[in-house]
Amino acid sequence: MLKCSSRTTFFAALTLLLLLLSACSSNTSAPSTAEDTTSQAGTTEAAAPAETANQTTYPLTIENFAMSGEGGEWKPKAQVFDKAPERVVANTQSAAEMLIKLGLTDKMVGVAALYGAVTPDVAEEFAKIPVLSENYVGKELVVGASPDLVFGRGDLFADADWGVGSVDGLNEMNIRTFMQTTNHKGTLESLYNDIAQLGKIFDVQDKATQFIDSLKARAEAIKASVADQPEHSFAYIVPATEDSITVSSMQNDTYQLDALSLLKLKNTFEGVQGEVSVEQLITANPDYLLLSAYSGSPDINKLIQNLYANPALQSMKAIQNKQIYVTDFSQFWGYGYQIIDGIEKMEKEMKANPIQ
């Protein structure tokens, strides 16, 4: 029995030893498996945010502006969005077109200020938006559309016949606002930032990024097209009447000036304050004259004919070389992406009629 017991004990010990060795073997491989599991989990956790990185989490706070009064100073004012807006009024045509580009036509309940040609690639969608006024629209019609967001050109947020109402007043009625920053010491970077902010507000960040990238590429293409050309000067003529010459110094029109710089165009009256006389225009003698056509503007073709025929202007290079160019009002003064369309058009026309 002793031998039997010893043999039993031996086999029991051997079995225990094999189990221990097996356990040690399992424990040795455990860290590798754990590392693999951790790595896979890390990839999964990294992948999940990658899928949701461009999704908006509400409530969302957007830093924007209000105005201290009609024509007053811009002051920072945040807007908080509990969800993506569902009913939007755009205070200009160009602002509405920007929302269409982001796939937001169905969110639009009103548009106003139809002063230029609708961009062809959004014309069909634009026709679906209710027109509150073909001119600048007042607060009563805007509020009557029951918006949860009013978006557009900043200086139209005023309590005036031509204004959509002040930011503070609209906010008090639980209507969120977003003032485009392109007409507040704006540049093309302001445009890109506005689009990015809209992407967050409406949770369409991927579309916003694609839109911004396409605009930047077009801007770079314009710059490249004139890279080997010298800088030229221009002056802007305000088409007040067909028979008069009104010159703008464009002193505060930083957005338009930044876009024109893509073509290496320099404002003749940079730094000039106040009105610019015809005598100053003749003395400055810019290479180009620019003006804009809008719905209801004077006959632009007749105005150009009068400029070319004006005896007082015959010494000017722009007159001698037939260098007058017309931009669409909505493109040039709409403070939206359409300014790139206008600059591209101008670039083609200038290349077709080079300065000799």
Image (cartoon, rainbow, N blue to C red):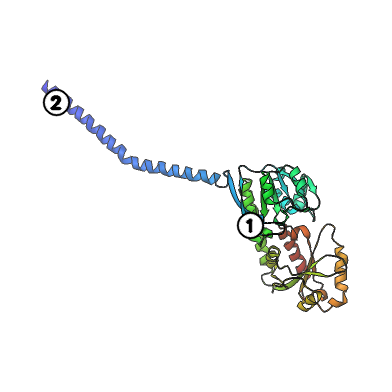
Residue 127 in picture, x, y percent from top left: 79, 46
* Count of residue discs: 2
The residue at the far left in this view is 2
What's the residue type where badge 1 is placed? Lys
| Pointer 2 local density, CA inside 10 Å: few below 14, some 14–19, many at least 20 | few
- The residue closer to the viewer here, 13 or 203, is 203
Q: Is residue 96 above or below residue 28?
A: below
Name the image quarter holding the C terminus.
bottom right
Give how far apart the Cα atoms at labels 1 and 2 are.
Answer: 94 Å
Residue 280: x, y in percent?
A: 78, 76
| Residue 354 in view, yes or no | no
Which residue appears at 83% of the width and 70% of the height?
A: 245
- Among all residues in the image, which is located at the extreme top? 1
Reading the image, the residue beneath label 2 is: 6
Tell me which amino acid carries mark 2. Answer: Ser
Where does the image place residue 228, in percent across and percent down from the top left?
A: 67, 72
Residue 59 appears in view: yes
Q: Relative to 2, is 253 on the left or the right? A: right
* Left or right of residue 58: residue 97: right
- At x 44%, y 42%, the residue is 41
**Res 74 quadrant in image:** bottom right
Give whichever of discs 1 and 2 has the lower sequence position: 2
